[in-house]
Image (cartoon, rainbow, N blue to C red):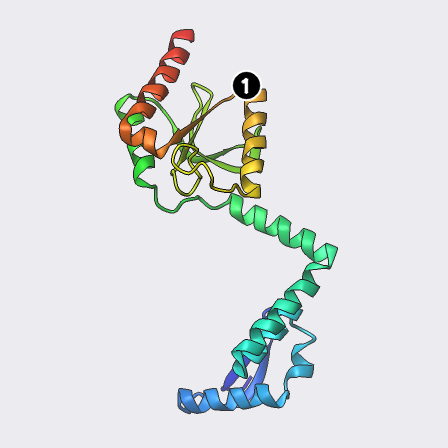
Amino acid sequence: MPTGVYIRTPLHGERISAGLNRSESRARRGAKIKALWESGHYDEVLKNFHSPVIRAKRVAHVNSKMFREAARLAKIEQWKNPVYRRRTIKMLIKNRSKQVFPFKDSSIEVAVQTFLLNSRVKFLKHKTVTEVEKYHQWDLVLPNSRLLVEINGCYWHGCPKHFPNKSFSKRDGVLDQIRFKARAIGWDVMVLWEHDIKSGVAFDLLGSVILGYQRAA
């Protein structure tokens, strides 16, 4: 294939020549590509490769407001397809299960982890328990005590003490179901709030639960 600038189609990885030379300046090449999009020269070629959402993005080179509206309508139409919807949801869930959230532990998470390390208690952080829910990551898992710990910030999770009127999202209802299922199959679930961790109350609660399991064992 001759040297030059190409438009790579994301679906098949094929390249379509834009008829430009890499020796030209970036501004000159950009102006030519914009002219190509405006002329609609590649519209018939690209529509065989691109999804409706990607096709809608081509108008970004012409008008950003037009792009946003076209992309929004394209996503709505694409989401109506049940096959696409099931495939997308399945892919998102699978990809999320392979990631570790958060990328950096918060200060209250570090405080609880330090307490457990000093107490010589084995724990796993940001792990899933497949028998409960294979995609939900618990902040701390104590396998020897069969204890699942969630560490919640007062603001982000709507602490009932400091934010009693904060509305709850649909995700909060899902979390309640996951916790109920965990308790039903023999796991204990403990939710530690930020204000309890900072005051030290959470460490007393966590320590007493761990000590109770150690004595029972």
State the residue position of label 1. 186
Q: Quadrant of residue 202?
A: top left
* Nearer to us in this view, 148 or 173: 173
Percent coordinates x, y for residue 204 in the rendering: 31, 19
- Label 1, residues with CA under 10 Å away: few <14, some 14-19, many ≥20: few
Residue 109 falls left or right of residue 160: left
| Quarter containing the N terminus | bottom right
Residue kind at label 1, given as amino acid type: Gly
Residue 183 versus residue 63 in the image, above or below:
above
Residue at horizontal 42 percent and vertical 38 percent from the top: 163
Percent coordinates x, y for residue 191 in the rendering: 43, 28
* Nearer to us in this view, 134 or 70: 70
Percent coordinates x, y for residue 48 in the rendering: 70, 75
Residue 187 versus residue 162 in the image, above or below:
above
Residue at horizontal 38 percent and vertical 38 percent from the top: 154
Residue 87 versus residue 18 in the image, above or below:
above
Residue at horizontal 52 percent and vertical 87 percent from the top: 33
Q: Quadrant of residue 130?
A: top right
Determine the secondary structure under disc 1.
Answer: loop
| Quarter containing the C terminus | top left
Q: How many numbered circles does the render carry?
A: 1
Residue at horizontal 64 percent and vertical 64 percent from the top: 75
One can see residue 143 in this view: yes
Residue 25 falls left or right of residue 115: right
